[in-house]
Image (tube, helix red, strand yellow):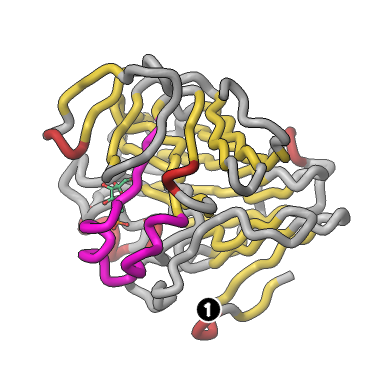
Amino acid sequence: EQCKGINGLDKVVLREVRGSSAEVYLYGGQVTSWKNDHGEELLFVSSKAPFKPPKAIRGGIPICFPQFGSHGLLEQHGFARNRFWSIDSDPPPFPTTSSNKAFVDLVLKHSEEDTRIWPHRYEFRLRVALGPGGDLMLTSRIRNMNTDGKAFTFTFAYHNYFSVSDISEVRIEGLETMDFLDNLQNRQRFTEQGDAITFESEVDKVYVSTPTKIAILDHERKRTLVLRKDGLPDAVVWNPWDKKAKAIPDLGDDEYKHMLCVEAAAVEKPITLKPGEEWKGRQEISAVPSSYFSGQ
Ligand code: TA6
């Protein structure tokens, strides 16, 4: 169902029979809400997010393309998150979700203006789907449409902002012993120590070549968010903590306590596509009740 969201921006609401739902803004092709079948919000969106183009929406699932972060010459996180996407009336077949009705297909194509900052023709097709159990699936297909024979290279992330009870009570499993590039230390490479990742200060890391399954355990909410990814070797973990949060105008001073970014990404090794070639990157997130804290 297509309707108007905040500030009259177009959005699509997906509903699944058992009660879960998701909202996708055409601005940014951005998921801004994902609720389980009890109506509980699983994503974080800042109460200070103005929902005013050309600024990207602070929260939900921004799409970072064709550049993650400042890994290149483009604006931070590329431009896809502050473009108006269209509903794709001619989507290619997506075999894994074809029987499911709760989905929307969006598309972003090169514009005259954007080819001045990134001189390439492309088609970016994004399917957002809700599975029968309320799982949220995002599939991106990016195709090189250049007619001048030129390949292009990009980095990418689903910049997931998850809602958490209290950042100090949350842990991540699946990244222990992994190598990471620390954004707070000139992207130097380190190896993660310890059993699980917990938070007591600012974190901004790109874990490289990680397992495909990562779990975010929220003890207080007795819930585990499970992220599965495909075609996206890296995982970014970010929490700005108090000082950085104060410096971000569209984030409340204390909101860092209730958010955690765990992102499915392709950052360390950029992706190159020749004309006509297509890349696919997929993530699936599910929320499962956890009556115990695994590993204690
Ligand atoms: O994914 C982590 C990160 O790249 C951080 O370095 C941090 O600055 C964040 O994204 C948010 O970026 P933004 O441009 O949305 O303020």
**Quadrant placement of the N terminus:** bottom right
Q: Amino acid at mark 1?
A: Leu
Q: Residue at x 86, y 54 (%)?
A: 18
Locate residue 158, reporting x and y percent.
46, 44
In the figure, is residue 115 to the left or right of 91?
Answer: left
In the figure, is residue 254 to the left or right of 165?
Answer: left
Q: Quadrant of residue 245?
A: bottom left
Locate residue 203, reporting x and y percent.
29, 40
Residue 244 forms part of the magenta stretch: yes
Residue behind label 1 places its C-beta within 8 angstroms of ligand 1: no
Q: Which residue is mark 1?
A: 9
| Residue 257 position (above or below residue 216) | below
In the figure, is residue 198 to the left or right of 17?
Answer: left
Can residue 29 be seen in this snapshot? no
Locate residue 165, reporting x and y percent.
53, 53
Given the current orientation, which residue lies at the most extreme front position?
296
Q: Residue at x 43, y 24 (%)?
A: 233
Given the current orientation, which residue lies at the most extreme right position?
17
Q: Residue at x 62, y 30 (%)?
A: 293
| Residue 27 position (above or below residue 126) | below
Q: Determine whether the residue tagged by mark 1 lies in a helix, strand or loop.
A: loop
In the figure, is residue 130 to the left or right of 57?
Answer: right
Label count reads: 1
Q: Residue at x 54, y 48 (%)?
A: 125
Given the current orientation, which residue lies at the most extreme left position?
186
Q: Which residues are magenta?
A: 235-258
Can residue 195 be seen in this snapshot? yes
**Quadrant placement of the C terminus:** top right
